[in-house]
Amino acid sequence: MIGFLVRRLGWMIITLWVVFTISFALMRSVPGGPLSSERALEPEIEKNIRARYHLDEPLMKQYLRELGNTLQGDLGYSFKLADFSVNEIIAQGFPISATLGIVALGVALSIGLTAGIVSAIRRQSLIDVTLMSLATVGIALPNFVVAGILIILLVFLWPVFPAAGWGNLSQLVLPGFCLGLPYAAYVARLARTGLLDVLSQDYIRTARAKGLRTPTVILRHALKGAMLPVVSFMGPAIAGILTGSLVVEQIFAIPGLGVHFIQAATQRDYTLAMGLVLLYTTLLYTMNLLVDVSYVYLDPRAKLE
Amino acid sequence: MTESPRLLEVRDLAVYFKTDEGIVRAVDGVSFDVDRGETLGIVGESGSGKSVTNLAMLGLVPQPPGWVERGAARFRGDDLLKMSERKLCGIRGRRVAMIFQDPMTSLNPFLTIADQMTEMTRLHLGHTRRQALSHAIGMLERVGIASPADRIADYPHQFSGGMRQRVMIAMALSCHPDLLIADEPTTALDVTIQAQILELLQEFQREQDTAIIMITHDLGVIANICHRVNVMYAGKIVEEADVASLFASPRHPYTLGLLSSIPRLDERGAERLTPISGQPPDLANLDNGCSFRARCRYAIERCANEIPELRMVSHGGQAACHVDVAEAAGQEKAHA
């Protein structure tokens, strides 16, 4: 187990380095740069700024400098958000996006698992068809449509929640629900398929032939195996959900990370984009590692190589 | 004749399935009895309804697409088919236990052997965790698992196929059931293991007076351990007799075909094996004739118009055939 974790940690560092290198090369090779804007700068000023951010150095030197700083945990200053270091931006935005993400995760798992399990047990019934149609709609509907409908219903027609903002619990409900809903739909479908698959196994027939009641058969004999596909899905899903969503955060005016992902890329904010890419890579890698480890606890046949 | 109720009386059991091709009559009017300490063999090819008959008695046919169309299965006088799910749960595993064909898939891979064995005796016999564990270890020892106290915490994948079937048997018999339904328990095992498993079943039967329904397509298994045999074809019992009579003088052409399609050591000369030609009928499209007639060398005109009923025949059992097979076979030999 320890050996496995150490090996995977080694691979993570290599992965991060590769991601760093590719991102660096990609960003420098696309047209435009952090200083291109509609208003042309005075050549003198531009020269000073380029020197300040070391953009006047040869690319290789820039690459090594940035890599060295990153290794020391310093992601540099943002090009666009003056006075803020990338570390500060992440330290401010990530806890907010992650909090929203955890709420969304709760929504996704509680609604998704319940719907999936009920659908599987009552397969081909009215309730199954209804829940699975809703799941399809949930996957198909974009966030902003769901958000719009919820705001009309629960903010204007029947005012129970605030329209937007950040700071108290009631402001978490609507965005958390909007962000979690598509994931809930995926989880529901995966849980249903997983459970149906397990329920048709021979060992479930054995369990029933032993005289166990249906709830026992499902809870003790079927659920563990049925959760495997959900767990695999949740790894990357959690990484995505924790780093925030541009759409949901924009609609509900939440100062999370979501907006930076898009803006850093479009504005060629080299340092901020790099920081966010590395953050996402780390999260994704960690979540997948957790999935692999949890498999060993879920399925006794699985072994960590 | 009706003093104390028999252990199991199945009457006119019919189980249908709804499929895309129409309604499949998987089991259609099957009746038989099982007494204490007796071994009844049910033999037939795949799809003849032998497994479904037994699953239906315990309410284990997947619904949908299957359902019990009619009939009764009285276990010690109570009809299992009319029982509430709650009451039936008290019979399954406690009074009537089952073991299945494939020991590789019939045990839950996510739970230890201890989990799977103890949950049964804790439920049915009210054992405490500790009682259940020591009982389970005793059962494993009984079926020949070496150092059971150490192995009981293992998962199924840590056992071989033969060992898993032993675990299944130990589990099935752990509540001392009155009836054990063994659905092809040796089919997935190699021959030496097969013999050991059959011996084990017989040992338990002698000790606990357990009745066994042995479902198989292997006539060798039937000859080995059964007292009486039902031959099933296309959802019906076509012949029923005690095992010696059935092997000595089969009275249904299908049984005759089954017997002449297996090699026999006691027959001198290199007589060729004769397979039964053709395919079993489509159970969704049965007509008003004998369902075996297309494959039957003795078929007469009447076979196409009238479904033969089971009737008493000279070997003391019953057969469902319009033709006297013994006579017809004799004439055939005389002509040749």
Image: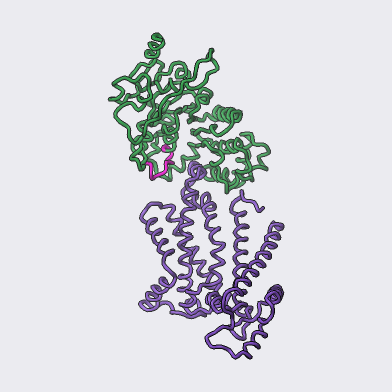
Q: Is residue B198 above or below residue B108?
A: above
A200 or A285, which lies in front? A285
- Most common SS among magenta residues: loop
Q: How many marks?
A: 0
Q: Is residue B326 left or right of residue B158?
A: left
The magenta stretch spans residue B57: yes
Colouring used for the render: by chain
Q: Farthest residue toward the left? A: B305
The magenta stretch spans residue A144: no
Q: Is residue A294 above or below residue B84?
A: below
B232 or A253, which lies in front? A253
Q: Position of residue B67 (x, y in %)?
A: 37, 41
Residue occupying the point 43% across, 52% down: A121
Q: Position of residue B120 (x, y in %)?
A: 54, 43
Q: Position of residue A165 (x, y in %)?
A: 48, 80
Q: Which residues are magenta?
A: B56-66
Q: Is residue A214 visible?
A: yes
Q: Quadrant of the C terminus of chain B?
A: top left
Q: Is residue B313 above or below residue B214?
A: above
Q: Is residue A96 visible?
A: no
Q: Is residue A203 left or right of residue A279?
A: left
A100 or A236, which lies in front? A236
Quarter residue B189 falls in = top right
Q: Position of residue A94 (x, y in %)?
A: 58, 75
Q: Farthest residue toward the top? A: B334
Q: Is residue A132 left or right of residue A246?
A: left
Q: Which chain is green?
A: B
Quarter residue B172 falls in = top right
Q: Quadrant of the N terminus of chain B?
A: top left
In the rendered picture, chain A carries what hue? Answer: purple
